[in-house]
């Protein structure tokens, strides 16, 4: 039974501690839209998205009003387009038309973002995959709401280094084509290892082929709630600290479970998963870095940061998994620089470097996320950073990702403003030593020995 104290606690979490449901994401399979004629394919895609998602935003707003729970984003994910466009798309430009169709459909139904302009190439690229990847810069430069992702590695398959090399070039080209918006296109592009099929968070969301025709996935958030809870046990031992995080994560996840069940019922769409990630925003008091400081660090990036983040991530999962029978997606703690005021402060103080962030990704939810780097960073250097992050994911059997933003025309120490939930960020220095000879080797890095399980 829910008692009055629990109701009051939830109200306080929403009104004072920045608790929100970060997103409800409607996954839509486009497999039945496939056609060899490009015009017909685009028509099929537009028709299915606008039919299936026509009430998504309306239902989200109804739940917000009735329960008083903010739902920050309403989003759509679709089947990776490289799988959908192979029969119809003869050139990268053909794939761009599909991106524009996705964008038009997203605007029609009123969602914030649509994800799935994606390719899965962890063991090699088909001709269709490569055409889609080469279309990404133009696709992101000519659309507003489309997000793109490419999975270039997995624990089972290893890392496709040809795709890694290509993605360094693609990220730089995307930055150049959107340089008038401080290379904003790169904020909508993420490179994955071990990408999950049911991720509701952008820019990496796509509707995996293991999913049904439609599904509702919900991503919750609540760094401010966790920080406030830890303030009440300041100075106490690690056992109390862990118990407090677990109990708080349970309460936050229950809010997401309520929203997911209501959205599923009202849209007549199966409920998929709750992603119980702590996803920060630029708002003061809504920061994962601030939680790390409350645990006992002067700044995120100080010695002990990786251990503190590992503790936080683990306790969030242990608490959240008890609150829902269907937990999935990424789940844990996000550490994006531009979207977390505490991370921004740590960079400006000199406490947080790209190398320390890489170490933290061994235990966080995703990886190197929303990091602005100098616009003159070489494509091979970007590929090297991607390769390092993919190796962490491959060897540790976890999801890792890279969302780097080389800001054309700007250098170390300058500030870049992305706006909204994407926030702002200081441009961070990148190791200038070359990895070009390594990146230019053809082929793939083999799967690790512990991948051989059957």
Image: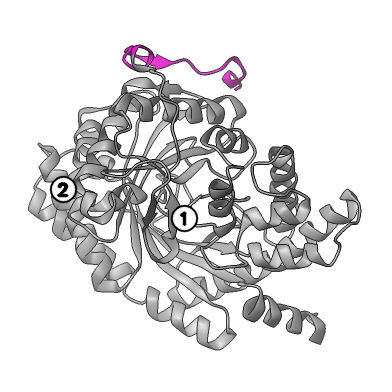
Residue 92: where, in percent of width, then height? 14, 39
Q: Quadrant of residue 291?
A: bottom right
Q: Quadrant of residue 258?
A: bottom right
Q: In the picture shown, does residue 19 fall above or below 76?
A: below
Determine the residue positioned at 27% across, 43% down: 408
Relative horizontal placement of residue 35, taking residue 17 as reference (left or right): left
Q: What colouring does the structure picture have?
A: one colour
User: Gap between marks 1 and 2, in whole Å?
Assistant: 23 Å
Among the two numbered marks 1 and 2 on one chain, the one whose residue lies closer to the N terminus: 2
For the C terminus, which image quadrant?
top right
Residue 345 location (% of width, % of height): 57, 54
* Residue at which label 1 appears: 201
Residue visible at 28% across and 70% down in the picture: 51
Q: Quadrant of the N terminus?
A: bottom right
Please name the residue that numbered disc 2 is placed on: 96
Quick check: 5 above or below 396? Answer: below
Does 443 appear in magenta? yes
The circle drawn on residue 209 is none
Residue 286, compared with residue 414, is above or below; it is: below
Helix, strand or loop at mark 1: loop
At 27% from the left edge and 45% from the top edge, which residue is drawn? 81
Which SS class for mark 2? helix
Residues in magenta, as a range: 437-454
For residue 84, what is the image quadrant? top left
The one of 297 and 86 positioned closer to us in this rendering: 297
Image check: 372 left or right of 128?
A: right
User: Is residue 14 visible in the rendered structure shown here?
Assistant: yes
């Amino acid at each position: 039974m829910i008692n009055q104290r629990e109701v009051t606690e939830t109200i306080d979490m929403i009104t004072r501690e920045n608790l929100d449901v970060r997103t409800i994401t409607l996954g839509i399979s486009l497999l039945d839209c496939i056609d060899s004629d490009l015009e017909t394919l685009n028509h099929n895609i537009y028709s299915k998205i606008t039919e299936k998602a026509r009430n998504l935003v309306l239902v989200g707003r109804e739940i917000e009003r009735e329960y008083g729970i903010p739902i920050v984003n309403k989003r759509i994910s679709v089947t990776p387009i490289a799988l959908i466009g192979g029969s119809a798309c003869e050139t990268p430009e053909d794939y761009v038309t599909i991106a524009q169709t996705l964008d038009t459909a997203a605007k029609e139904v009123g969602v914030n973002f649509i994800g799935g302009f994606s390719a899965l190439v962890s063991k090699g690229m088909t001709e269709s995959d490569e055409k889609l990847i080469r279309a990404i810069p133009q696709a992101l430069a000519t659309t507003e709401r489309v997000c793109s992702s490419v999975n270039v590695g997995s624990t089972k398959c290893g890392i496709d280094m040809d795709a890694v090399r290509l993605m360094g070039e693609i990220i730089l080209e995307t930055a150049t084509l959107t340089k008038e918006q401080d290379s904003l296109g790169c904020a909508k592009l993420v490179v994955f290892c071990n990408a999950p099929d049911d991720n509701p968070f952008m820019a990496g969301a796509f509707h995996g082929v293991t999913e049904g025709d439609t599904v509702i996935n919900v991503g919750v958030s609540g760094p401010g709630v966790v920080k406030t809870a830890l303030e009440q046990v300041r100075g106490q031992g690690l056992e109390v600290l862990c118990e407090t995080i677990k109990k708080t994560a349970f309460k936050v996840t229950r809010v997401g479970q309520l929203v997911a069940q209501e959205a599923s019922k009202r849209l007549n769409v199966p409920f998929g998963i709750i992603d119980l990630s702590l996803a920060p925003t630029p708002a003061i008091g809504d920061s994962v870095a601030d939680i790390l400081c409350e645990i006992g660090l002067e700044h995120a990036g100080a010695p002990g940061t990786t251990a503190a983040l590992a503790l936080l991530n683990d306790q969030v999962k242990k608490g959240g998994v008890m609150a829902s029978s269907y937990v999935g997606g990424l789940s844990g703690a996000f550490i994006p620089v531009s979207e977390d005021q505490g991370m921004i402060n740590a960079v400006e103080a000199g406490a947080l470097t790209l190398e320390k962030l890489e170490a933290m990704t061994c235990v966080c939810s995703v990886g190197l996320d929303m990091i602005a780097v100098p616009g003159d960073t070489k494509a091979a250097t970007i590929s090297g950073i991607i390769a390092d992050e993919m190796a962490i994911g491959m060897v540790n059997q976890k999801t890792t990702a890279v969302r780097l933003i080389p800001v054309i025309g700007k250098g170390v120490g300058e500030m870049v403003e992305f706006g909204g939930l994407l926030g702002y960020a200081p441009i961070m220095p990148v190791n200038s030593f070359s990895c070009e000879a390594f990146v230019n080797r053809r082929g793939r890095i083999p799967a690790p020995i512990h991948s051989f399980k059957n």
